[in-house]
Image (cartoon, rainbow, N blue to C red):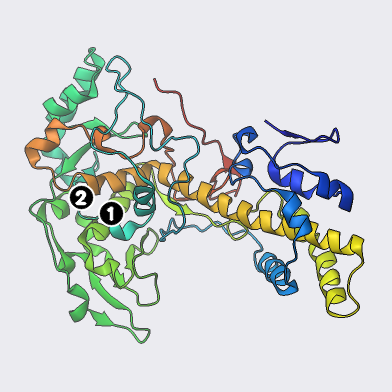
């Protein structure tokens, strides 16, 4: 829904309403925007702003200067080839559609699954975007694993059960151990309960001039069943990087390395999360990605219009410091300040929305589910279908073939930089 004004003008969202050039009198006459009238688009989700007090208030010129400087520093686009993961801040609670917090009720006739244990809070969303808080996993393996020879009979049975009318995935999983992921490919779980992790592995690792400590995965993680299934994982190098965000980690598919911050390097779960991303590459499972930052990885809709106001704002600042402003110029400076302030909020809202798209990536949801199922025994794993422990509903997950960067508007194609359609699907 758009915004209408008492002057007979209309605007499609809040920022365009604020940016509409007005005379000082019209500016002071504007009424507060009703937050209940915001549209579904993210531009209108970051709260209402009452223009009247801003037009009448005084703000030190240096405050306006900081805002214009901030705008100047945010330029360009960059969609990385690798889906690196980083710690995010300020994401908590930004879920206006309730997609992550309100799973659909279980309906066995439609095969919709919900996690009976998880009620996602703002802290959970913050935690979900920080890979370093993962702990352990039940690795999700596929048909390309070397262990498939002994499991072909179970896979064949799962396919037969599905084809001949046993549509309930819980029953198929309990009988065979196989299940389908978000992109539709068959999987089974490798039990990690017998694996061991050397928490201080980096103390004896090879040290570079930059202070990086490097070792091979097999020296860090003792997990014979995993390496039997995927021998190629034995060649993965793990790097503890003192310059990387302390609690961050990432899997680099081209280099076959897992890079970890100083705190993340101590966490087995963080390592297993990234190992799951490596398996996604091997199997062709849905991938993960990275949350983009507005005006770094993608462009915000109103950035150009706001940047065009900077020269005028700078001229007014110069006049404040020399001969002062006329009444009309003073009102105009307050208007510009209101626009810049709203843009800062708008930019933050864009980053929060990009983070939500990141949480919805099927590869990331799977890697987080690896953490959730750590404490389950082998018997308990069969009792609870993996989809039932995912923290994002399956029908709103976004399966992608390559690691991607997310934006406020959706998923960016890593090859073209264009948006990929990524709206929630209707539950089947």
User: Residue 250 at what x, y percent from top left?
Assistant: 36, 61
Mark 1: give few (<14), some (14-19) or many (20+) Cα within 10 Å: many
Q: Quadrant of the C terminus?
A: top left
Residue at x 37% of width, y 64% of height: 255
Tell me residue 277's x, y (percent).
Answer: 32, 52
Left or right: residue 334 compared with residue 255: right
- Residue at 34%, 48% (x, y): give it: 124
Q: Nearer the viewer, residue 363 or 38?
A: 38
- Residue that label 1 marks: 273
Q: Earlier in the sequence, mark 1 or mark 2?
A: 2
> Which of 257/13 is in front?
13
How many marks the image carries: the answer is 2
Residue 408: give x, y in percent of width and height.
57, 47
Task: Determine whether, in the image, residue 362 is placed left or right of residue 276.
Answer: right
Q: Which mark is residue 137?
A: 2
Whether residue 292 appears in this view of the structure is yes
Residue count near mark 2 (Cα–Cα under 10 Å), binned few <14, some 14–19, many ≥20: many
Is disc 1 in contact with disc 2, using a CB cutoff of under 8 Å? Answer: yes
Left or right: residue 50 versus residue 408 is right
User: Residue at 43% of width from left, 55% of height from top?
Assistant: 83
Q: Is residue 134 shown above or below 181?
A: below
Q: Secondary structure at mark 1?
A: helix
Residue 198 vs 364, above or below: the answer is: below
What residue is at 13 percent from the left and 38 percent from the top? 149
């Amino acid at each position: 829904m758009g915004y209408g004004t008492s002057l007979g003008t209309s605007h499609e969202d809040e920022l365009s309403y604020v940016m509409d050039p007005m005379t000082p009198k019209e500016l002071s006459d504007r009424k507060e925007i009703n937050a209940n009238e915001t549209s579904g688009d993210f531009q209108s989700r970051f709260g209402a702003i009452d223009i009247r007090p801003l037009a009448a208030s005084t703000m030190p010129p240096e405050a306006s200067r900081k805002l214009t400087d901030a705008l100047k520093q945010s330029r360009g686009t960059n969609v990385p080839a690798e889906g690196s993961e980083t710690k995010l801040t300020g994401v908590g609670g930004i879920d206006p559609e309730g997609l992550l917090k309100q799973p659909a009720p279980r309906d066995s006739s439609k095969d919709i699954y919900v996690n009976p244990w998880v009620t996602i809070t703002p802290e959970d969303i913050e935690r979900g975007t920080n890979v370093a808080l993962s702990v352990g996993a039940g690795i999700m393996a596929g048909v390309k694993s070397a262990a498939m020879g002994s499991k072909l009979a179970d896979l064949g049975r799962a396919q037969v059960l599905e084809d001949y009318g046993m549509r309930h995935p819980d029953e198929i999983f309990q009988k065979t151990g196989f299940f389908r992921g978000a992109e539709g490919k068959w999987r089974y779980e490798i039990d990690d309960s017998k694996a061991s992790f050397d928490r201080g592995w980096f103390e004896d690792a090879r040290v570079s001039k930059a202070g990086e400590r490097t070792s091979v995965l097999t020296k860090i993680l003792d997990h014979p069943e995993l390496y039997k299934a995927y021998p190629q994982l034995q060649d993965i190098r793990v790097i503890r990087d003192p310059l990387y965000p302390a609690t961050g980690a990432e899997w680099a598919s081209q280099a076959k390395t897992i890079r970890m911050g100083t705190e993340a390097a101590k966490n087995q779960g963080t390592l297993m999360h990234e190992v799951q991303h490596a398996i996604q590459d091997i199997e062709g499972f849905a991938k993960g990605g990275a949350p983009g930052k507005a005006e770094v990885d993608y462009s915000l809709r109103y950035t150009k219009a706001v940047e065009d106001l900077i020269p005028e704002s700078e001229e007014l600042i110069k006049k404040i410091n020399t001969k002062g402003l006329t009444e009309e110029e003073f009102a105009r400076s307050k208007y510009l300040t209101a626009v810049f302030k709203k843009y800062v909020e708008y930019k933050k809202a864009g980053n929060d929305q990009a983070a939500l798209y990141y949480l919805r990536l099927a590869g990331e949801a799977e890697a987080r589910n690896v953490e959730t199922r750590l404490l389950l025994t082998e018997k308990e794993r069969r009792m609870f279908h993996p989809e039932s422990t995912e923290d994002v509903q399956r029908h709103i997950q976004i399966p992608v073939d390559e690691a991607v960067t997310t934006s406020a508007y959706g998923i960016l194609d890593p090859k073209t930089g264009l948006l990929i359609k990524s709206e929630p699907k209707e539950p089947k």
